[in-house]
Image (spheres, helix red, strand yellow):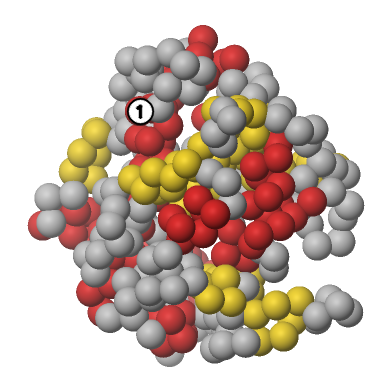
C-alpha cells in the first residue's frame, strides 16, 4: 500500500518506468526482427516500431481474420518511424508518390518525401489531402497549393471549422478538373455512398490527375459488400456485422468492406487502376491504390 502523501511522487515514476519498458521492448523487437531501415518520409535511419495492440481484440473478432493477417494489419497500422512518426501505410503512400510522373515529367530523383515536397514538381501540384494522413501531413503542409480538409458531420462542405476546411467526399466543393493529386488513407470505407464519392473524386481530378489511397483490405474477402447504409433520416441501418474503427465496437462506422474486386469497381467508376504492393496476402495487407483519371 502506497501512503497517500507519496502517491503524487511515486505514480509518475511508476508510469514513466512502464512507458520506458514498453518503448525498450519495441526497440528490442525491431532489432530481433531486423526492422531497421531508412524512412522514405523523413530520410532518417532507425528502427520501425511494431505495435500489435493497435488492432483491438473487438475489431479483430468482428473482422474475422486469421492471426497472421491481423499481424500484417498491425504492421500496416504501426511499424512507426521514431523520427517522424509515420506508419507503414504512410511510408508506402510516400514511396508511390515519389515514383509517379505527376506532371508528365520523369519520377522525382528525391530520396525522401521531405525532399520531394521541396521539389519544383511537387510545389506546382494542386493537392487535396482529404482527412489527415499522419506522418505525411506535416510535410504536405509545405506545399503551397495544398488543400487540406477534414470531415465534419455537422458542418457544410466548404465551411471552415477551427480554420480547417470541411469536405465530404460525396459532395466535394472543388471545381471540376481542379486537382492534380487527391490523397486519402483509410477513409473510403467510412463513406456511406461509395459510388457517389468515386464520382466526385473523378469529377474534381484533372485528366491525368490521380487519387492515391489506402483502404482496409483483408484476405479472404472476394467481393466488396456494404456493412451499413444511411436511412433517409440519417440513422445507420446495419446490413452485416457492425464494425467501427479503431475499436471494433466504437469509433467511425465502416459502411463498405472492400474485397478483391475493388480494382474492378474502380475501373467501372472510370479510373485507370494500379495496385501497388499487391496482391493482398495473409502476410501483407498494406497495398496502395493509384487511380488515374484518363485523358479521354
Ligand atoms: Zn521517418
Judged left or right of residue 225, residue 216 is left
Q: Is residue 177 above or below residue 188?
A: above
The residue to which callout 1 is attached is 99
Q: Give coordinates of residue 181: x percent, y percent.
A: 57, 32
Q: From this viewpoint, is residue 244 visible?
A: no
Judged left or right of residue 57, residue 283 is left
- 209 or 127, nearer to the observer: 209
Residue at screen point 66% across, 44% down: 201
- 165 or 50, nearer to the observer: 165
Q: Give coordinates of residue 186: x percent, y percent.
A: 52, 57
Within 10 Å of disc 1 (Cα), the crowding (few <14, some 14-19, many 20+) is some
Q: Quadrant of residue 141?
A: top right
Judged left or right of residue 231, residue 225 is left
Q: Give coordinates of residue 260: x percent, y percent.
A: 38, 66
Residue at screen point 37% across, 15% down: 106
Residue at screen point 77% across, 45% down: 172
Q: Is residue 121 above or below residue 271?
A: above
- 134 or 238, nearer to the observer: 238
Residue at screen point 81% across, 80% down: 231
Q: From this viewpoint, is residue 47 visible?
A: yes
Viewport quadrant of the N terminus: bottom left
Q: Give coordinates of residue 246: x percent, y percent.
A: 53, 71
Amino acid at each position: 500500500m502506497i501512503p497517500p502523501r507519496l502517491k503524487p511522487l511515486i505514480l509518475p515514476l511508476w508510469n514513466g518506468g512502464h512507458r520506458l519498458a514498453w518503448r525498450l521492448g519495441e526497440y528490442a523487437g525491431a532489432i530481433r526482427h531486423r526492422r531497421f531501415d531508412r524512412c522514405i518520409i523523413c530520410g532518417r535511419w532507425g528502427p520501425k516500431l511494431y505495435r500489435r495492440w493497435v488492432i483491438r481484440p473487438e475489431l479483430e473478432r468482428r473482422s474475422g481474420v486469421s492471426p497472421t493477417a491481423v499481424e500484417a494489419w498491425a504492421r500496416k497500422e504501426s511499424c512507426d518511424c521514431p523520427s517522424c512518426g509515420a506508419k507503414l501505410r504512410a511510408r508506402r503512400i510516400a514511396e508511390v508518390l515519389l515514383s509517379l510522373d505527376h506532371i508528365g515529367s520523369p519520377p522525382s530523383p528525391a530520396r525522401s518525401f521531405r525532399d520531394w515536397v521541396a521539389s519544383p514538381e511537387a510545389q506546382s501540384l494542386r493537392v487535396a489531402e482529404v482527412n489527415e494522413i499522419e506522418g505525411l501531413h506535416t510535410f504536405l503542409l509545405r506545399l503551397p497549393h495544398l488543400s487540406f480538409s477534414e470531415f465534419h458531420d455537422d458542418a457544410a462542405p466548404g465551411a471552415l471549422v477551427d480554420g480547417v476546411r470541411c469536405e465530404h467526399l460525396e459532395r466535394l466543393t472543388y471545381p471540376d478538373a481542379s486537382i492534380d493529386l487527391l490523397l486519402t488513407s483509410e477513409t473510403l470505407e467510412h463513406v456511406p455512398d461509395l459510388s457517389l464519392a468515386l464520382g466526385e473524386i473523378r469529377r474534381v481530378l484533372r485528366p491525368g490527375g490521380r487519387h492515391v489511397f489506402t483502404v482496409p483490405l483483408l484476405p479472404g474477402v472476394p467481393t466488396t459488400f456494404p456493412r451499413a447504409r444511411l436511412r433517409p433520416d440519417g440513422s445507420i441501418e446495419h446490413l452485416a456485422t457492425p464494425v467501427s474503427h479503431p475499436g471494433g465496437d466504437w469509433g467511425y462506422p465502416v459502411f463498405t468492406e472492400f474485397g478483391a474486386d475493388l480494382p474492378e469497381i474502380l475501373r467501372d467508376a472510370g479510373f485507370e487502376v494500379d495496385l501497388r504492393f499487391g496482391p493482398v496476402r495473409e502476410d501483407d495487407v498494406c497495398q496502395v491504390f493509384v487511380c488515374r483519371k484518363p485523358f479521354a
